[in-house]
Image: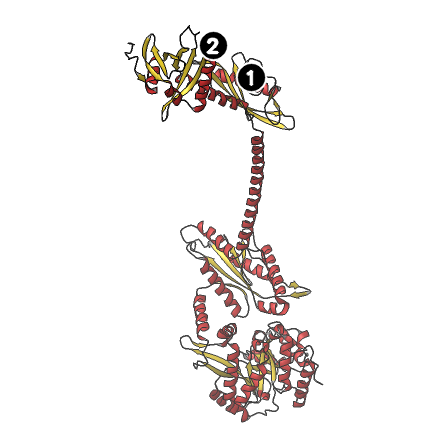
Amino acid sequence: MPRPHLSSDLELGLREVLDLLQERRVLFWHAEVGQPRVMIYIDDAHLGKWDAGALWASLSPEDGALLDASLRQVVEEGGCFDVEYPLTSGPGEQRWCHFSGFCPPPQMGSPTRLMGLVRDVTVQTTSHARSLEQAALLRGLCEQQMVGITIKDLDGQFILNNADPDSPAGRPVGGALAGRHGAPLSSPEVLALMDRLDREALGSGQAAVGEVDVEGLDRPLSLRMSKQPFWRGGEIVGTVGFTIDVTERRLLERRLLEHSAELELRVRERTAELQAAHDRLHHAAMHDALTGLPNRAQLQQWYAEKRAGWPAHTAQDSGLPLLALLMVDLDHFKRINDRFGHAGGDLLLQQLAGRLRRGLPPGAALCRLSGDEFVVLLAGDLPPQVRQLAEALLAELQRPFVLGERAVQVGLSIGVTFAWHPETELRALLDEADMAMYTGKRSGRGGVRTFEPWMRARQTLLQDLEDDLPGAAERGELSVVFQPVVALHSGEVPGVEALVRWQHPRHGLIEPDEFISVAEAQGHIKAIDLWVLREAARQLLPLILAGHLRTLAVNFSAQHFSEASFMGQLRATLEETGLPLSALVVEITESLFMEDHRRASVLLRDLLREGAGVAADDFGWGYSSLAKLQHLPLSMLKVDRAFVATSAQFPGIVRSIVEMARSLNLAVVAEGIETEAQLGALRELGCGYGQGYHLARPMDVPALSAWLAARPATSLGSAQPVPHDQAPEQQQQQQRDAQDHAEPPEGVAPPG
């Protein structure tokens, strides 16, 4: 580098000096003590003068004071000085300079001088500071107790081991991992893991990781070790290892596993509970709670499953139906509930369900549809086989049931229908079975009935009757006809029975058997009965006042006797029409005594006491028993037409009824006399009275008047029908006996 040409008088500032140092690295200087100038040289070339004040101004006050003290000491005591200070030439510009020098012995007459070197050591100082900082960081890293750090050479000697700070490098570790629990690194388990990881790291050139469980001073510990190759100059010269205490993590992991297992167990248990709840809800949704049988929803599912497997063509050609459906229903189930309470009715339904289960073949599906209706599905059976099964079920179900301590026999009806086409809907089958079942019920015989197409028209008719019956009387569609009651031995006609007819605007004349049950179901029967009484009394009163007839018999539903207002309504109607109560015969069905025996007994006894007659209609077909009959307030029995029809061939039943009635002083009227043979048989059996088409058909008042006028005159006698072998005095005694035998209700004493 060429020597700079500077004047010896050139004033050098700090910037020039630092630039020279940056270029030359070393400058020579000398200065006379007490002079403000420092002479700067490069080699032997004098560069210029540097104001000493500028030097002190570039130092911090502390560094300036230290430099001043060092120079004074050298001047006063001799020797050398060697210092480094940062020089600041501007904002953010700082250079480290190394000053060294000495004070030569002064010569005679010469001033005291200082001389020496100044060097720019910024790079060295910065690098040294960085090294110190890194060393401090490394020292801090090694001094921490969370991670054990080791460096081993290829011979297995430790170069660094922060787990035992006092052990010198190159000495195998024999201390303990720094930590709270003192995990001995010299334990066989730890040493074996360290050796294995060292071999793996050195052999593969990649990191190797492992964990080991050891016994600490106060509790078991878990350590995790990782070993990596220690590279230097592109070669592996050893291994670097890190050891951490993972006891807490392993404990958390174990707890997590335990909690996970517990949670999984709870999830399984909860899932099982939810599944069980779902199964219970599904079972409840698909089954009847009372009987445990499948319900309508399950029936629909069954039918859908069966229907999905049916062939696409009709089965009618083969004669084997796709499916048979039976609907089983109890007759007059309400009477069971009224007599035994709902608990008794429920018990009956449960027993009935049990018998149905036991009576069905394997593969049959049974469900409770609603109330007292049950449905059976059968597949693979011919119609005769299905009917045979239905009749066998009916016979089994008609055996007495035990309710409490009572044996109860109930009537049942079974409707049967068949699915012949794969597109047949379940609703259609249920409707058909229902039509067949109620056709049997309306016939009064129940039993097993198979659906026939004409029943659809019948169902349509009944639906029209249900819709049109309300208001029929007001529209003038109802009328009353009268059927004479004839003394079978004398031919006398003491009275008539009023019968209601309905002239429907579309369906023509409707018989009472067609619409009375509809009226009872709709609650219109009481109004119709009172209308019949009012209309019959109004029309028949002239014949009674004229002495042509003595009595008018009117049928009254059992629904009247559930209300205490019936007697008031009856008296009001009679007062309105002028018919005396002594001319009225109240006809009731014997089922009335099964439903509300005591209340009905009170009302009927009052009627008898006031002179009216009381007749048990359709006697012998329903629920009557001799034990009850002898206590009922009656004056007459009307034998059911079913027994009258067979009186010539099987006279025993009618004979028993006549003899029983005679023992109770009751008159007997045979209903439905259709032939001369029946008439002759009834006379021989001692039956006093009869009515039927063979004697006289029902007729209106003009026809009745003409019919009575055409008959020979007879003595009418007393107000009540008198058996042919009884005198009026005997009949009066009969009425008194009937009143005496009437069973009083609780709290009411018999008349004295």
- What is the residue that sits farthest to the right in this orientation? 752
**Residue type, label 1:** Asp
- What is the residue that sits farthest to the top in this orientation? 108
* Percent of width and height locating residue 370: 53, 61
* Percent of width and height locating residue 488: 59, 84
Q: Which residue is mark 2?
A: 79
* Percent of width and height locating residue 492: 57, 88
Q: Which residue is mark 1?
A: 195
How many tags in the picture? Answer: 2
**Above or below 529: residue 212:** above
**Residue type, label 2:** Gly
Q: Which mark is residue 489?
A: none
Q: Nearer the viewer, residue 646 or 266?
A: 266
Q: Quadrant of the C terminus?
A: bottom right
Residue name at image x 59 percent, y 91 percent: 716
- Between disc 2 and disc 1, whose residue precedes? 2
Q: Nearer the viewer, residue 526 or 305?
A: 526
SS assignment at label 1: helix
SS assignment at label 2: loop
Q: Quadrant of the N terminus?
A: top left
